Image (cartoon, rainbow, N blue to C red):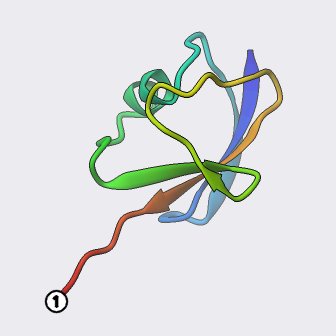
Amino acid sequence: MKISVHIERTNTTQKIDFSGITVRQLLCQLDLNLETVLVARNNEVLTEEETLQENDLLEILSVISGG
């Protein structure tokens, strides 16, 4: 399946071939740490177990913490 992914940290958008079905599998394929990013679709944050669909447009946002 092909999905479009916008990575906020690098400000890049790419279409990727994705063989998994969940957000967790996508982040593993992109070699991103699950604890340092959020994945959003249509301005809604997705859980790690959320199922992805063909032609989804996702945003990968960096988690920022501070004090």
Nearest the viewer among 45 and 11 is 45
Q: Left of 36 or right of it: where is 48?
A: right
Query: Which picture quadrant has residue 43?
Result: bottom right
Vertically, is 33 above or below 49?
A: below
Query: Type of residue at label 1?
Result: Gly
Image coordinates for residue 60, horizontal then vertical, percent: 54, 52
Query: Which picture quadrant has residue 56?
Result: top right
Q: Secondary structure at mark 1?
A: loop
Vertically, is 19 above or below 10?
A: above
Q: Quadrant of the N terminus?
A: top right
Q: Left of 50 or right of it: where is 16?
A: right
Q: Quadrant of the C terminus?
A: bottom left
Q: Left of 66 or right of it: where is 11?
A: right
- Give the total number of marks visible in the rendering: 1
Vertically, is 8 above or below 25?
A: below
Query: Which picture quadrant has residue 19?
Result: top right
- The residue at 35%/34% (across/down) is 31
Residue receiving disc 1: 67
Image coordinates for residue 4, horizontal then vertical, percent: 74, 39
